[in-house]
Image (cartoon, rainbow, N blue to C red):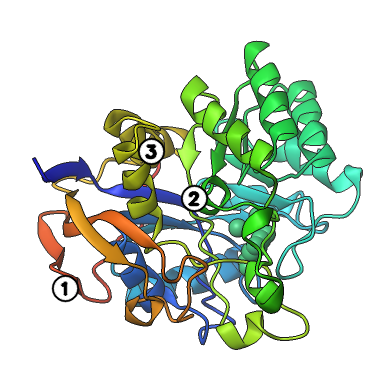
Amino acid sequence: MSFMRLPGLIDPHVHLRDPGHTYKEDWDSGTASAIAGGYTCVLAMPNTSPPVTDPDRFESIISAAREKARCDYGVYAGGSSTNTASVSKLSKKVSGLKLYLNDTFGDLRLDGLHSINAHMAVWPDNRPLLCHAEGYMAAVVLMLAMLHRRSVHICHVSRKEEIDLIRAARERGLPVTCEVTPHHLFMTDADIDPIVRGRYVVSPRLNTQSDQNALWQGIADGVVDCIATDHAPHTLQEKDSQNPPPGFPGLETGLALMLGAVRGGRLTMDLLVELMHINPARIFRLAPQPETWIEVDMNKKWEVNASGFHSRCGWSPFEGIKLHGCVNKVSLRSKVVYSNGEVLGCVGNGRYVNQL
Ligand code: DOR
Ligand code: ZN
Ligand code: ZN
């Protein structure tokens, strides 16, 4: 059987650049890219320009999304050193609070243990708290979550040492969840082309084969909860500049890469659905989207050519690779919004996804 129906995918980690850098992506192009990749709901990161750190900025990003989104969406708030007390006013509106503990794009990086600790103490335990926390910072986050007896979600885990820590924390009953990206599952530092090194700059960086093996093992063991693209569009001109910003676009390649892994026997289709729909819905407490599904063609072979992608950034780190399996049709709340390579869903079709 070559066609299969799956629930609409949920990507809990995308950067849509609107407001601030809409030449890279906006709510229109980013959600077209999502639908073309099989996602019917995306949760947007707060490191826009300006970042989503207070109620006014939240209202302005939501009004842009309401006008332009083609799929359903949520938006995270960002923790800064000055909003530890005030950001909790947003806790019932946003999809979660994101804390940046390592260098990133934009200026939301939190400096100092004091600010991290204060956010952990104040953000309600029943609302998602997400951390960009690499290496030692993963240990800091787990320690603080333990002290505050709270849940935490660790974004884009990319190293063996991080997976090992998360596994150990879960074995001790800590409510920690985590995600990995398709690029860390399918690329390593050996794939970096030194001639166009900037194109491979991403945060967390591409790591070793042994790190990648640990991520796949974490999927097999149930330590990894979600696949999240960390879709982070920047233009090719920026990536090839002296100071390349970190990030890869990923919405239009993520599912096909994972379908290839199913075909290759690395995971089952049931596990793919858990990682890309069931667990993101559970962790981020998202209300179900009725009559929302995707149809995938397991037999379709295609080659990545980003010039045909919907993302405005116009390139892909997977350019030229051959994939097996693609999205054929997408239904969003009873409406066919994608069919035979065409995005049919209009801007403004997307709805803010309520949290349970
Ligand atoms: O590679 C990345 N890109 N890592 C981040 O932390 C931020 C993201 C972006 O917004 O471009
Ligand atoms: Zn990050
Ligand atoms: Zn990110």
| Residue drawn at (47%, 38%) of the image | 226
Quarter of the image with the C terminus in it: top left
Q: Which residue is mark 3?
A: 281
Nearest to the observer: residue 265 or residue 51: 265
| Residue drawn at (32%, 79%) of the image | 308
Q: Which residue is mark 1?
A: 344
Q: Quadrant of ligand 3?
A: bottom right
* CA distance for labels 1 and 2: 26 Å
Quarter of the image with the N terminus in it: top left
Kind of residue indicated by mark 1: Leu
Kind of residue indicated by mark 3: Ala
**Does the beta carbon of the residue at mark 1 sit less than 8 Å from ligand 3?**
no
Q: Position of residue 355 (x, y in %)?
A: 40, 42
Which label was assigned to residue 182?
Answer: 2
Kind of residue indicated by mark 2: Pro
Nearest to the observer: residue 70 or residue 242: 242
> Compared with residue 353, is residue 349 higher up or lower down, i.e. above or below?
below
Q: Residue furthest top?
A: 172
Q: As drawn, is 195 to the left or to the right of 18?
A: right
**Does the beta carbon of the residue at mark 2 sit less than 8 Å from ligand 3?**
no
> Compared with residue 21, is residue 39 higher up or lower down, i.e. above or below?
above
